[in-house]
Image (tube, rainbow, N blue to C red):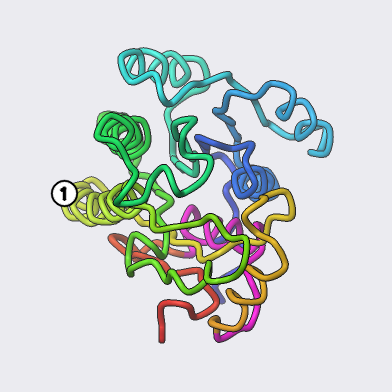
Amino acid sequence: MIDYLDKFSLKNKTAYIVGGLGLIGSEVSKAMVSASAKTVILDIDSDRANILLKVLPKNAAVYYESFDCTDLIALDKNFSDVISKHGNPNIFINCSYPRTKDWGGSVASSFEDVSLDSFRENVDIHMNSYAWLAKIAASEMKSNNTGGSIIQFGSTYGYVGQDLTLYDYEGSTQKENMPYAAIKGGIINLTRLMASYYGQFNIRVNTVCPGGVHDENNPVQNKKFWENYSYKTPLKRMGKPEEMASTVLFLASDASSYVTGATLMVDGGWTAI
């Protein structure tokens, strides 16, 4: 009889997580560690890294490397240096969320107010960094003939249009976000192309698309927003970071060995209606 639980084990595999200290990323890092992967966290906040490392098992093979994914000029060298230090990736996960300082309120990213410079820079540091890092990871997997799993983070708003009625309440400053839709839509379709090309090398490439994830520290997510979002979601609540992480674990493991090119909606049913 097949041991189905064993299929979720990542023992003897190395997982790289870009943005592994964020709201979702920290849970993804925990999931990789819990499945016994050698886990390499790539992020820019050493203080948050120290906090996370303290709650992980002391005997875990987990490492933090300061890594700025917005430095596109040095991206090849910096990622290659990390791979040289920690070994070939069997699993590559990108859940980073790079953005410009004017992103703070979506007003700056609306059709009426976004500047060309801001739009171009956000596409460059977000979509282009995702694309290029995935390409490097896939090339490493291909050259080492190991196969592997690449997991990119998209969004429901890279798949469907933004529901602006969520922000229809007194005091809301949120508007449509032009660069976000372009960025996440681009990531989703690049995943499909990568799956098509790299499948012959036993490299699987998939996209996880979260719906709204509850974050008490996000000023946009006030009580009215939570109510509006939950009302429109079949499961009647926002998502949890650990629900995104468990989905990533499935895609990283052999439990999903015949899944590639998929856009997996983890949204409580948001895009189903």
Q: Of 36 and 150, which appears nearest the observer? A: 150
Q: Which residue is mark 1?
A: 197
The spot of residue 142 in percent (x, y) is 26, 35
The quadrant the N terminus occupies is bottom right
Magenta residues?
234-255
Indicate the secondary structure of the residue bearing disc 1.
Answer: helix
Instruction: Please state which of residues 152 and 199 is positioned toward the viewer in this rendering.
Output: 152
Q: Residue at x 56, y 64 (%)?
A: 212
- Tell me, yes or no, if residue 138 can be seen here: no
134 part of magenta stretch: no
Residue 131 visible here: yes
Residue found 67% across the figure and 50% down from its top: 219
Magenta-drawn stretch contains 247? yes
Residue at (43, 26) in percent of width and height: 69
Q: Amino acid at mark 1?
A: Tyr
Q: Is residue 256 above or below residue 60?
A: below
Where, by quadrant of the figure, is residue 109 drawn?
top left
Q: Nearer the viewer, residue 185 or 42?
A: 185
Query: In percent of the image, x 54 and y 36: which residue is there?
Result: 19
Counting from the top left corner in percent of width and height, residue 202 is at 28, 50
Principal secondary structure, stretch drawn in magenta: helix
